[in-house]
Amino acid sequence: MPYVFYKRVKAKDVPVAVMSESATFNNVLAPASIRKVYDALRNQGYLLQRVTLSEFTRYILSPEEGLFRELRLVRKYDGKEVVRLIPRSQPVSPYAIALSLSTHAYVSHYSALYLHGLTLNVPKPIYVKSRRTKAKNPPHEAGELTQEQLDSAFSIPARMTRNIYTFDHEGTTHEVYLLEKSAEIDNGITKVPAPHAPSGIAVSGVEKTLVECAVKTNYAGGAGEVLDAFRRARETLKILRMMQLLKNGHYLFPYEKNILFYMDRAGYSEQQKNLVKERSRPDRKGFTTYLEKNMHGRLLDPDIGIYYPQGLESE
């Protein structure tokens, strides 16, 4: 495309400028980030004022320029396609591609366990939480929960999201589980370095990851994987921060018992476990809850008041 850039701009500097701005988005461009790269280059005096966003997009996609190509992500249940732009000549993190599906998204659950080194397994799906389009229901008032309601909720299989996207990248087909989170401001999110992600990967922090995995073990490889993660986090886990994040979640069910079970089986000290007990809701202590949904061959821990799958024993 002739005359996209000012003549005073050296030709060799143009791709550098484009890729420098693209790095802010880990070199994965959605429509909104294409616009931001375009605006940045205009403000820096690279682009001619008459060049439109469409012309700029055609320029960076031009095979002659060799900058970007299209990557298609397909939603499995209805075939809906989402197009992202990725570099032709630079590797890109699959986590960055997955995060581009939603604004304000972060890597969660099993994938977050992997990024934090809390599992030896490499999860095949990539789990990502995205902003909920509608506000979450108001927090449940104390006293709403009954034992019958709790028993019924955990007697059925865990629901799995239908919002699953696939994309082919560097010879591998990836699946992205796009989960919803609250529309409220989120805490407990951090960034970690990752290969081919110059801006880092947004991920739930260790404490938030363990809370979310304790709540939804079906997205974390099961209770055994969550228990192993608690073992690996034992020396560094910030328990008070974890309990504050649990409180902020306004969960109806007494998931503090799930956390206490994992800590007990993972060999945490009595002092550490007391931090959980002291911050457990008094109105939930009398309930008997469940570590997972739809368990078979379950056992009861009467001290904590929780059913758990056979095989989850102490160290």
Image (cartoon, rainbow, N blue to C red):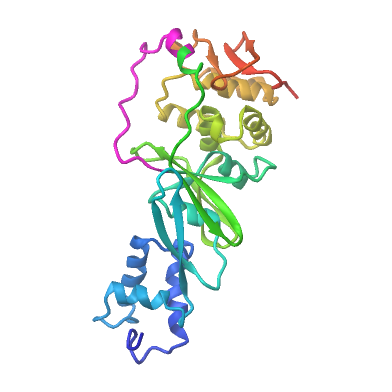
In the picture, measured across the screen, residue 103 lies left or right of residue 168, that is left
Q: Which residue is pictured at 63% across the width and 24% down the height?
A: 262
Query: Quick one: which residue is furthest to the bottom in this view?
Result: 7
Q: Going by the picture, which residue comes out furthest to the front? A: 78
Q: Quadrant of the C terminus?
A: top right
Q: Is residue 116 above or below residue 268?
A: below
Q: Is residue 213 above or below residue 310?
A: below
Q: At 38% from the left edge and 78% from the top edge, which residue is drawn?
A: 59
Q: Which x, y percent locates residue 134?
A: 29, 37
The boundaries of the magenta stretch are 130-151
Residue positioned most to the right: 315
**Where 33 falls versus 131 (above or below)?**
below
**Closer-to-camera residue (221/197):** 221
Q: Position of residue 170 (x, y in %)?
A: 59, 62
- 50 to the left or right of 302: left
Q: Position of residue 219 (x, y in %)?
A: 54, 35
Q: Name the residue located 61 percent from the left edge and 60 percent from the top edge.
A: 171
Residue 134: say if magenta. yes
- In the rendered image, residue 92, in percent from the top left (x then y), is placed at 54, 63
Most frequent secondary structure within the magenta stretch: loop
Instruction: Report how many numbered discs are placed on residues in the image.
Output: 0
Residue in the foreground of this view, choosing between 129 and 82: 82
Q: Quadrant of residue 302?
A: top right
| Residue 186 vs residue 173, the one in the foreground | 173
What residue appears at the point 53 percent right and 48 percent down from the top-left corner?
175
Rendered position, 144 above or below 11: above
Q: Is residue 139 on the magenta stretch?
A: yes
Pick whichever, 221 or 140, lies toward us.
Answer: 221
Position of the N terminus by quadrant: bottom left
